[in-house]
């Protein structure tokens, strides 16, 4: 329980939440306005055709994998099906055609979901990192709640009431560094540098990353984040990791996006910080690219820059996973 007389530093005394680090200024409307005006004056045209990224046939286990098996299937953007500890876990599920308040406008999919919704296995746990439309999709949540009513939903502080209106029955809110269990599977809510808000209200709910662990196997879903000083603490308190699902896209222009989104080079450096001193084989799984065009960089650029940064830093090539939509990889 939070002590009301001594709240954590990421709890804003004026209400809601904040990034507690000095290099993390709050996003402001004037910055968004400047970006919109800049794009209108000098638009950046991306000629990447839709449906042009590689696709793979999913190869996850039905209805569940054995407790000793660990796999990831990339649905797209920040959505994964994680099979760990004999359970099926979804991260930031989005199956809608657009990540938007409405389905006639807003960022549209470049690639269809890697797993068709009606081919999902029984879902046991859903993890949400924050409330932005490309991570929390109300239509998808209603579909999951109807098709998988027994699923447990784990969310950061401030999201339970909104989520409850969409249909999920079993919801737990966690603060940074809090821990909970779903049967034998352990989940930890960890810091991220971002913001929240749908519409004009900002930072009334928290943002986070998640650790999923079972008998020493550890998967870290970084969520949406800029570069922050807590990666070392996350590694020392909750590592070592087997896989790190790391965002690499939606970073340009840097003057606006740097506080809230890693670029590919920062993503690789964050991986190094998270794995420094560990002899465990850990793969970095690139996410948050190739599905929705949210910012100015070309759709094909994030994995190219991530691979180049990875090799430049002398990291083992087979531990950088640039997955195809729908691809399943097993962690042995």
Image: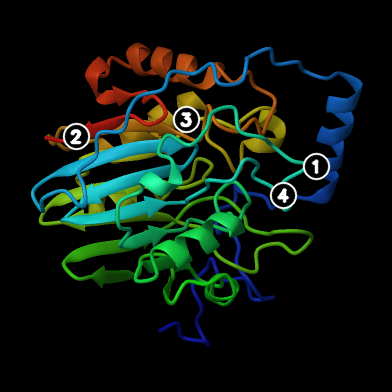
Crowding at mark 3 (Cα within 10 Å: few <14, some 14-19, many 20+) = some
For numbered disc 1, what is the local secondary structure?
helix
Q: Which residue is mark 4?
A: 27
Asked if disc 2 and disc 4 are in contact, CB closer than 8 Å, the reply is: no
- The x and y percentages for residue 74 are 38, 36
Where is residue 252 shown, x and y percent of the image?
A: 66, 27
Label located before the other in sequence (3 or 4): 4
For label 3, the residue is 266
Which of pointers 2 and 3 lies earlier in the amino acid sequence?
Answer: 3
Disc 4 packing (10 Å; few <14; some 14–19; many ≥20): some
Dot 3 falls on a residue whose secondary structure is helix
Query: Which of the numbered marks, if any, corresponds to residue 330?
Result: 2
Q: Are marks 2 and 3 in contact (CB under 8 Å)?
A: no
Residue 104 seen in this snapshot: yes
Q: Is residue 63 left or right of residue 100?
A: left
Name the residue rendered at 33%, 12% in the picture. Answer: 311
Q: Can residue 232 be seen at all in this image of the molecule?
A: no
Q: CA distance from mark 1 to mark 3?
A: 23 Å
Cα separation, mark 3 vs mark 4, equals: 19 Å
Q: Are marks 4 and 1 in contact (CB under 8 Å)?
A: yes
For image coordinates 54% across by 28% down, the residue present is: 111
- Find the distance from the CA under tag 4 to the CA under tag 1: 8 Å
Q: Reading the chain from its start, which is encountered first: label 2 or label 4?
A: 4
């Amino acid at each position: 329980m939070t002590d009301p007389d001594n709240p954590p530093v990421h709890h804003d005394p004026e209400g809601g939440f904040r990034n507690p680090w000095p290099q993390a200024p709050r996003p402001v409307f004037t910055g968004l306005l400047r970006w919109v005006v800049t794009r209108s004056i000098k638009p950046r045209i991306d000629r990447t055709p839709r449906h042009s990224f590689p696709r793979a046939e999913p190869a996850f286990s039905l209805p569940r994998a054995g407790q000793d098996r660990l796999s990831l299937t990339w649905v797209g953007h920040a959505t994964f099906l994680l099979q760990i500890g004999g359970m099926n876990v979804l991260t930031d599920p989005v199956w809608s055609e657009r990540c938007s308040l409405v389905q006639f406008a807003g960022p549209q999919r470049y690639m269809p979901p890697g797993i068709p919704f009606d081919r999902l296995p029984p879902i046991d746990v859903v993890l949400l990192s924050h409330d932005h439309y490309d991570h929390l999709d109300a239509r998808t949540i209603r579909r999951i709640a109807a098709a998988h009513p027994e699923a447990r939903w784990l969310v950061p502080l401030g999201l339970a009431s909104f989520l409850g209106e969409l249909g999920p029955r079993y919801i737990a809110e966690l603060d940074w560094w809090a821990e909970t269990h779903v049967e034998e599977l352990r989940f930890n809510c960890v810091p991220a540098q971002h913001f929240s808000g749908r519409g004009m209200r900002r930072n009334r709910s928290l943002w986070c990353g998640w650790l999923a662990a079972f008998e020493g196997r550890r998967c870290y879903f970084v969520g949406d984040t800029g570069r922050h000083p807590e990666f070392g603490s996350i590694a020392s308190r909750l590592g070592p990791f087997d896989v790190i699902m790391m965002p690499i896209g939606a970073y340009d222009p840097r003057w606006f996006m740097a506080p809230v989104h890693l670029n590919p080079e920062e993503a690789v450096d964050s991986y190094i910080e998270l794995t420094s001193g560990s002899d465990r084989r850990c793969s970095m799984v690139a996410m948050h690219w190739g599905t929705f065009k949210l910012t100015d960089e070309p759709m094909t650029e994030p994995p190219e820059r991530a691979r180049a940064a990875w090799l430049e830093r002398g990291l083992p090539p087979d531990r950088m996973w640039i997955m195809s939509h729908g691809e399943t990889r097993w962690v042995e």
